[in-house]
Amino acid sequence: MMMQRSLLLLLVGAAAAEVVYFPIEATITFPEMAGKPSGTIKLSQASATDRTEISVDLTGLEGGNKWHVHVDAVPATGECSALATGGHFDPAGANYSSGAPRPPYEYGDLSGKHGKLNATSGSGGSFVRTGQAVVMDATLPLSGAYSVVGRSIVIHKVDGSRWTCADIVGKLCPDGCIPRSPTSRRLLFGAVPKPEPPGCPPGCGPAPSEY
Ligand SMILES: [Cu+2]
């Protein structure tokens, strides 16, 4: 079916039971909630080796808000806390806590890679202005062991606290797609352990508010 499409077939994971069709698209929808930003962030990756295109269309931001991919999906309670969505997604071990210069950036550090949302020019170099921005990201895969699909994006207030969060919901194929849920992502790829908060021995508690 749909064989006319140029499809790159990729066997994923040890089970090799699922075929991934490209492009993969994923959408993050922030619902309208009083006092919180709302809108969508869309991700699209043409093939497993292409960069991921990010487009941002959000309203209600303060301006200069950090945004990150966090390890876990948003729980049913809607909580964005460190215990709920975990720390930044950092599968390649950029390990900010080591104090090493950046880059390399954590895969999940979207504001580090592309600038804060709606930051005024000059406040931190690069910036992403919503509604206009399409940025390309070489470390934001939508398939494979480092896939961000099934995780979450957290938008922080300027003071660093977690403001709102939403799941990264992917589609495996352009037509008749089955959204890939966090549960199926974990079945495919396994859970990536939550990174330890900086300066914090294993199991010492929630990450600082920046995370
Ligand atoms: Cu964050």
Image (spheres, rainbow, N blue to C red):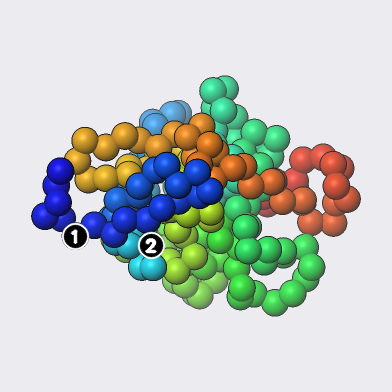
- 109 above or below 151? below
Residue closest to the far top? 77
In the image, the residue with mark 1 has its CB under 8 Å from the nearest atom of ligand 1: no
How far apart are labels 2 and 1 at the CA level? Answer: 13 Å
**Other residues around mark 2 within 10 Å, as few (<14) / some (14–19) / many (≥20):** some
Horizontal and vertical percent for residue 93?
Answer: 68, 63
Question: Tags 2 and 1 in contact by the CB under 8 Å rule?
Answer: no
Residue at the spot of label 1: 6
Question: Which label sits on residue 48?
Answer: 2
The residue lying toward the viewer, choosing from 145 and 34, is 145
Horizontal and vertical percent for residue 7?
Answer: 24, 57
Choose the circle earlier in sequence order: 2 or 1: 1
Question: Which label sits on residue 29?
Answer: none
**Can residue 41 be seen by looking at this rendering?**
yes
Q: Mark 2: which amino acid?
A: Ala
In the image, the residue with mark 2 has its CB under 8 Å from the nearest atom of ligand 1: no
- For image coordinates 56% across by 61% down, the residue present is 107
State the image quarter where residue 112 is shown.
bottom right
- 74 above or below 104? above
- For image coordinates 47% across by 60% down, the residue present is 140
Horizontal and vertical percent for residue 198?
Answer: 79, 56
- Give the side of residue 157 with respect to residue 60, left or right: right
- Give the side of residue 111 with respect to residue 40, left or right: right
- For image coordinates 67% across by 66% down, the residue present is 94
Dot 2 lies on which element? loop
- For image coordinates 35% across by 49% down, the residue present is 20
**Can residue 56 be seen by looking at this rendering?**
no
Residue closest to the far left? 4
Q: Mark 1: which amino acid?
A: Ser
